[in-house]
């Protein structure tokens, strides 16, 4: 179930977010927001116990999706790091 939820939500929403990142000037802002959201979603996991496991499992799904968003933001900067094709390979 976890893989299905992450796979479907990623395939539906990440192309839209990729277009926003590639064709607008909001790349740095979205990268910062996704980094803060990733940390905020991972912080409550330190309170895992028998009574909170279900909420932490839901947060794990949210955290995986935010992680994909943040990875996309980071990968968007790769072409700008160098113009030398040998360095990029």
Image (tube, rainbow, N blue to C red):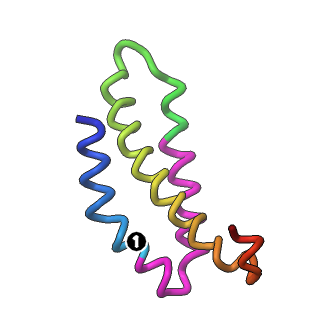
Q: In this view, does 75 lie to the left or right of 9?
A: right
Is residue 20 inside the magenta stretch? yes
Front residue of 16/51: it is 16
Q: Residue at (42%, 45%) from the top-left corner?
A: 64
Q: Is residue 21 left or right of residue 10?
A: right
Front residue of 83/5: it is 83
Which element carries disc 1, helix, strand or loop? Answer: helix
The x, y position of residue 3, in whole percent, is 29, 40
In the depicted structure, whether residue 13 falls above or below residue 53: below
Where does the magenta region start and end? 19-41
Q: How many numbered discs?
A: 1
Front residue of 78/42: it is 78
Task: Report the residue marked by disc 1.
Answer: 17
Q: Residue at (77%, 71%) from the top-left corner?
A: 87
Q: Residue at (33%, 57%) from the top-left corner?
A: 10
Quadrant in the picture for the C terminus: bottom right
Quadrant in the picture for the N terminus: top left
In the depicted structure, whether residue 54 falls above or below residue 66: above
Instruction: Tell which residue pokes out farthest to the top in this image.
Output: 50
């Amino acid at each position: 179930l976890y893989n299905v939820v992450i796979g479907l939500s990623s395939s539906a929403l990440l192309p839209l977010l990729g277009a926003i990142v590639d064709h607008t000037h909001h790349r740095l802002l979205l990268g910062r927001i996704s980094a803060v959201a990733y940390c905020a979603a991972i912080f409550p996991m330190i309170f895992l116990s028998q009574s909170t496991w279900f909420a932490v499992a839901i947060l794990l799904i949210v955290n995986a999706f935010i992680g994909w968003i943040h990875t996309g933001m980071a990968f968007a900067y790769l072409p700008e790091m160098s113009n030398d094709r040998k360095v990029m390979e």
